[in-house]
Amino acid sequence: MRRALSERQAPRGAGIGLAASTLATLLLLLALGTALAQPITDPDTDPRVREVAKDLQCPVCQNLSVADSPSGLAKDMRALIAKQLDEGQTREQIEQYFVERYGEGILLRPSHRGFTGLVWLGPWLALGLGLVLVALTLRRLAARRAAPTIQPVARPEADPAAGSGETDRYERQLEAELARYRERVG
Amino acid sequence: MGDLGHLSLLGALLLAALAAATSLLGAWRERDDLLESGRRALYGACALVVVAALALAAAFQLHDFSIRYVAENSSRLMSPLDTLASFWGGQAGSLLFWALGLALLSALSVWRTQRRSPWLVPVMAGTLALILLFFLGILTLIASPFERVPVAPPDGRGLNPILLDTGMRIHPPLLLSGYMSYSVPFAITVAALVTGRLGNDWLRALRPWLLAAWTIQGCGLLAGAWWAYHVLGWGGYWGWDPVENVALLPWLVATALLHSVMVQERRGMLKVWNVGLLLAAFNLSIFGTFVVRSGVISSVHSFAQSAIGPYFFGFLGATLVVTLSLLFYRLPDLRSEGEFDALVSRESSFLFNNLLLVAMTAATFWGTIFPLVSEAIQGTRVAVGPPYFQAVNGPILLALLLLMGIGPLLAWRRSSAASLRRNFLAPIAVGLASGLVLVALGMRQLWATVAFAAAAFVFMTITQEFWRGVRARMRAGEPAPVALVGLVRRNRRRYGGYVVHLGMVFVALGIIGSTFFQQDHGLRLARGESATVGRYTLTNEGLFQETQPGRQEVYAQMAVQADGALLDVIRPGKHTYVNWEQQPTSSISITTTWPWLEDLYVVLVSPNADGSASLQVFVNPLVSLIWLGGVLFLLGTVIAAWPERPRLGTPRPLVSRPQAVAVEA
């Protein structure tokens, strides 16, 4: 079970989409279970019809789904969806039916396949790119902080002879002051 | 009136051209006389645009139908208030409103900046004059609101009926003003880029104008949501319509910017990023105006279509090229001064805030233009609807909500484990507890429960901050209310910000409630028949008809009972306007009930000949919290933006010293 799950999630980024579609399928099966139990009497109000209709664009409206549109065509489409559901067709089959007649543009939830899949890829790309940018910024700025603390260690090694007593004394004093300062601040 | 308006616009065009030329030339040659005349020309252009706008408003009130725009957007039957709103009912008037706002704001901002940061003014005035010039050019040459018709009709066509509403008087002017007001921070940034003074001087000059633009646009978006909810009748307030999306884009970018400028203010970091965000916000606001007013993407707002598209596109392209060149030229001056100390710090939380907001902007932008991309490449226009935007933006919004609770409690530089424990123990406990309570009460939707718990967590973090501040002052002997006022007054930006966050928590609650728990039912009720929806029982008491001047009203009188007791008598109706018979509008009945703040939202779909009523009934929980959140949002920004009284004897430092002048954020 565990193995099967991890295999299904293999393509990175598609994980949530997959989980969502699995969930949707489960819900649909549940809905279908009840659909088999009782036929749809009122296509305009039945939640099973709405579930399918709200992801279809009303072809004669602007930005209204088949579920929300008051137009006559949308009403006919809802009745058709109800009939198909009663015949036991799945949501995918019904969507396919409408895509064949009205084209890809009828799906308000764009398909994950083919060229249209790009619309789903965009947000992941933006998020991924942003994460890389944030990581790079954090690293670059953190590296600049690290630099000055390395310097004083490197200097005496580069020129050991120059370690005169005076410079050493000043350096020790500086270190001590810094330590005291840090204590007070921290 | 038409001639006066047209001549004023022409005069304003000439003065704007003069202002742009003299300001920029004066800045280049460092000639004060030229700069002075540039400013005066800008004030003059502003005055003439005001005259033109007054002329159009007067033409509307006097019903001068010899002007095409007046004839097409108003009629004698409309009330004076509706006639006033006709000003922005079409394209040319909207653009004139844009220009009016821009002219007034340009004059005001130049006048104020002249007194506070005069080195910015030359280029700033020049930039604003150029933007104004572009809009005046469109208004005089391509889409004039003062164009005449050969023969004046006896009466006008009237305004599109869905626009005849209180919302129409508020939402479009606010949104147009919001778009327009990004011009000032943009002009200030261009001036800072040209002069090379990009330190705290720039931020101090920029901040009030950026905050103003962000507030105005935020209110415009909320007013738009309110209007859609009360007028359009599909039970929701946000439809992910292309025009709504493009209005959201600059606001999201500005939200990111308002947070990331604090990092620059405090630590001198992210300068290039901030300049980039500001340029993006301005370009997106021009893009938004262009989309609203060109009909390039079909939407419910495309009652305003025309051929101004190519000009806007050219303007957008030119702006992008010029500003990006300036940015690259100044890159060496924009090096970071500070450095990151730890991953768990305020700075890094702002980075993630920016990441999420910009990702949401990118996703929304991509989904909105994808139909165009697909049409250009594939030849078929696909639809990208609400399911896409909800699936993509929902998780981002949840993450933003959580971050809103975490970020403000992290310390600058680094947070110690002890402070994390002290700050987060109570909020996490409250969040978890409320999640468990919801599950115990029977909530079974995973994401809704998680989102509510997250909102409770954020609410607790904000309450805790207020409580700690008030308690500290009460120990000094102040009574609680005085302590609260004193706390907020001492630290306006910080506590104003918290109030805005609190508003956002309420907005989030409303969105979660109505997204996950909306019920909707279609009903057909014969006279005297009852039906039950949720805990409400509706009874059709009959259909009634009324004739008003210019319109017919049909309404169904319905008695609403909740749990057996009479709650309300409602009258959802349909209005049919003269000249617009094909487009009846709904008069929606919305009743808010206790204790779950449910809106019983009833739309009369059609009154039937047999006396029955076809209704669509929605039960929308918590939507009123969105409007409450909007009020808090406005209150918070006013608190944060309220000018602080300058303290006597402490002149503001003139040099850029990020640590010293940083104001508590």
Image (cartoon, rainbow, N blue to C red):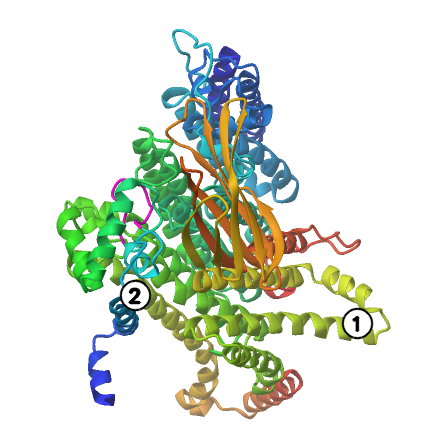
Secondary structure under tag 1 reads helix
Residue B245 in percent (x, y) is at 39, 49
Outermost residue on the left side: it is A100
Disc 2 marks which residue? A124
Lateral position of residue B395 relative to residue B469, left or right: left
Q: Residues within 10 Å of mark 1 (few under 14, many from 20)?
A: some
Outermost residue on the right side: it is B477
Instruction: Identify the residue shown where x is 33% and y is 70%.
Output: A132
Residue B81's place in the image compared with B231, above or below, is: above
User: Which one is nearer the viewer's eye here, A90 or B664?
Assistant: A90
Tag 2: amino acid? Trp
Magenta highlight range:
A56-66
Q: Provide the major secondary structure of the magenta segment.
A: loop
Residue B136 in percent (x, y) is at 44, 25
Q: In the rendered image, which quarter contains the C terminus of chain B?
A: bottom right
Is residue B28 visible in this depiction of the protein? no
| Mark drawn on residue B366 | none
> Is B246 colored magenta in this rendering?
no
Asked whether disc 2 touches disc 1, contact meaning CB atoms under 8 Å apart, the reply is: no
Tag 1: amino acid? Arg
User: Which one is nearer the viewer's eye here, B50 or A10?
Assistant: A10
Disc 1 marks which residue? B473
Give the alpha-carbon distance from disc 2 to disc 1, as whole Å: 47 Å
Residue B54 in percent (x, y) is at 57, 21
Lateral position of residue B373 relative to residue B582, left or right: left
Secondary structure under tag 2 reads helix
